[in-house]
Image (tube, rainbow, N blue to C red):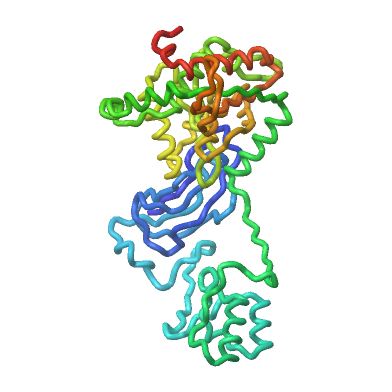
Amino acid sequence: MKVDVTVPELAESITEAVIGEWLKEPGEIVDAGEQLVDIETDKVILEITAPASGELISINKRKNEQVQSNEIIAVINAVKQVAPASAKKLHQAPVDEFSGTEKITLLKPATEPAVPKTSPAVRKLAAENNVNIENLRGTGKDGRIIKQDIKAYIEASASDVATEIPPTPQFETRGIREDKRVPMTGLRKSIAKRLVSSQQESAMLTTFNEVNVQNVVDLRQRYQESFMAAHAVKLGFMSFCVKATLAALQEFPVLNASVEGDNIVYHDYFDIGIAVSTPRGLIVPIIRDADSLSFADIEKSIGDFALRARENKITIEDLTGGTFTITNGGVFGSMLSTPIVNPPQSAILGMHSIQDRPIAKSGQVIIAPMMYLALSYDHRIIDGKEAVQFLVHVKNIIEDPTQLLLQV
């Protein structure tokens, strides 16, 4: 029985989905639930698994081809009992996926040596110096023979001293200059489009302030062990910042609003996006109804997002929506930056690294852990006065976090 492998239903907000590297080829045996391929969208990576056990008889979409929701990308010949997955083929004459007829494959003798991988330039250099490339061991990627291998062989033969081909130098010499072009991933292209669009379509400004986080540092040191024992998660700086932001958003609701044509859309809920860095790029998963969560709930949500982002387990639903975003460049050592608003939101708060700096307090100079805050906002709907007062409100709460308990 033939079973189709299809693309899952994609969200309307996804503009494109592209096939990644296939882990199986036609003729191979697959097990139900075994991963076949990744589909990369402009938001997340989706793992496509085999819906049934059997033989993968055809692949309809190859790497880098675009696909749509519910599109058939492969077909499996499902059987009740199949050989172990280690058996690569069901038979030696696989069925041609286009004609439906059997095609005969001529097998090369097992003893036939593999032809070394080379480029035309390398073969030319070998021919000019009478070097048999089949005698060489390639040190390039996937065993590829590169120019350095040829030159090393020539030098070793001339000196008659070296008995082995020396390893490839860590850096190419100035005489060999190569360019490597890598296509942007779907996520990277989406990031590029959204950031350029944000700057072109909004009147973006950034205001700055600095905050003394000594009281937060003291609270974390005092209650870290008991907090861990009670909630099985560490008490971090981000939860304080989220809580302070929520209090400020309630005072200045326009920063939690968005622009829709000629309208300002005010949201009576607070879905806070937390920027998370991944090997593929920056993503912003959403903490829903953050104002109803405790410190521990916020810390657990952020930790869960970070873990699933590293494992490519973030879903489309995790990234959809959001009324305000917080980003923390300080984890990478950033001292100051101007974050870009994530449309259709109207503002984003940037945290930065905490550094001990001299400040004036009560007529004296003291050393305190200081952090710069940056608020970028859309000046079309947010006035400078509101932006500055919002940031001052966040600063005051972080410097005196007991206000969160008293709700003042």
Foreground residue among 310 and 71: 310
Residue 400 drawn at (x, y percent): 46, 15
| Image side of residue 133 versus residue 408, left or right | right
Foreground residue among 298 and 170: 170
Q: Across the whole image, how many numbered discs are drawn on residues?
A: 0
Q: Residue furthest left?
A: 229
Residue 56 drawn at (x, y percent): 42, 59
> Image quarter for residue 23?
bottom left
Foreground residue among 135 and 408: 408
The quadrant of the rendering that contains the N terminus is bottom left
> Image quarter for residue 352?
top right
Query: Which residue appears at 44% of the width and 49% of the height?
Result: 4
**Is 163 situated above or below 353?**
below
**Is 140 situated above or below 321?**
below
| Image side of residue 10 versus residue 49, left or right | right
**Is 379 situated above or below 110?**
above
For residue 169, say whether it is visible.
Answer: yes
Foreground residue among 87 and 163: 163
Query: Which residue appears at 67% of the width and 22% of the height?
Result: 378
| Image side of residue 9 versus residue 380, left or right | left
> Image quarter for residue 132?
bottom right
Query: Which residue appears at 44% of the width and 20% of the height?
Result: 290
Residue 297 drawn at (x, y percent): 37, 24
Query: Which residue appears at 49% of the width and 26% of the height?
Result: 368
